[in-house]
Image (cartoon, rainbow, N blue to C red):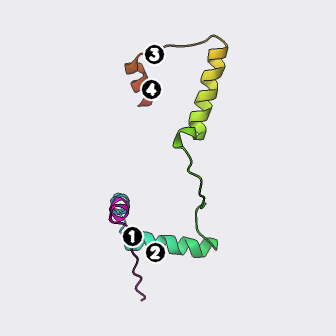
């Protein structure tokens, strides 16, 4: 069996370790999964881009924003208290 050594920033490794642990994985298993998926897909198994996508603009938020704009334009503004908004979030 081959051994691979990589260098990675301490904080980046610690954050990844936390996520892998939560998933019941370790770094070796996670890396092996990545390599297997790379082979199966014939390339990196996710989109690689230099663009930073703002998570605020996800499809669900955009749907809600469009609906809110429509309601505001139709004069259907609904006011809510902070507690009501927090309850909606849950």
Q: Position of residue 2 (x, y in %)?
A: 43, 88
Q: Secondary structure at mark 3?
A: loop
For residue 8, which numbered disc appears in the image?
A: 1
For residue 48, which numbered disc appears in the image?
A: none
Q: Which residue is mark 4?
A: 88
**Disc 4 or 1, which lies upstream in sequence?**
1
Q: Is residue 34 above or below residue 90?
A: below
Q: Is residue 42 magenta?
A: no
In the picture, the quarter occupied by the C terminus is top left
Q: What range of the chain is rendered magenta?
A: 1-15
Q: Secondary structure at mark 1?
A: loop
Mark 1 vs mark 3: give the one in front.
Answer: 1
Corner quadrant of residue 89: top left
Q: Is residue 83 above or below residue 50?
A: above
For residue 80, which numbered disc appears in the image?
A: 3
Give yes or no for contact between labels 1 and 3 (Cβ–Cβ under 8 Å): no
Q: Residues within 10 Å of mark 2 (few under 14, many from 20)?
A: few
Q: Position of residue 61 (x, y in %)?
A: 56, 34
Give yes or no for contact between labels 4 and 3 (Cβ–Cβ under 8 Å): yes
In the displayed image of the protein, which residue is found farthest to the top? Answer: 75
What is the number of callouts on the image? Answer: 4
Residue 10 or residue 66, whichever sits in front? 10
Q: Position of residue 26 (x, y in %)?
A: 35, 68
Distance, label 2 to label 1, CA atoms, is: 16 Å
Q: Residues within 10 Å of mark 1 (few under 14, many from 20)?
A: few
Q: Which residue is mark 2?
A: 32
């Amino acid at each position: 069996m081959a051994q691979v050594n990589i260098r990675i920033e301490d904080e980046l490794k610690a954050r990844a370790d936390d996520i892998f642990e939560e998933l019941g994985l370790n770094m070796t298993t996670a890396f092996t999964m990545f390599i297997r998926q790379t082979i199966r897909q014939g390339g990196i198994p996710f989109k690689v881009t230099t663009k930073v996508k703002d998570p605020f603009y996800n499809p669900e938020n955009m749907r809600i924003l469009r609906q809110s704009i429509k309601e505001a334009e139709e004069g259907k503004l609904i006011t809510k208290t902070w507690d009501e908004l927090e309850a909606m979030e849950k």
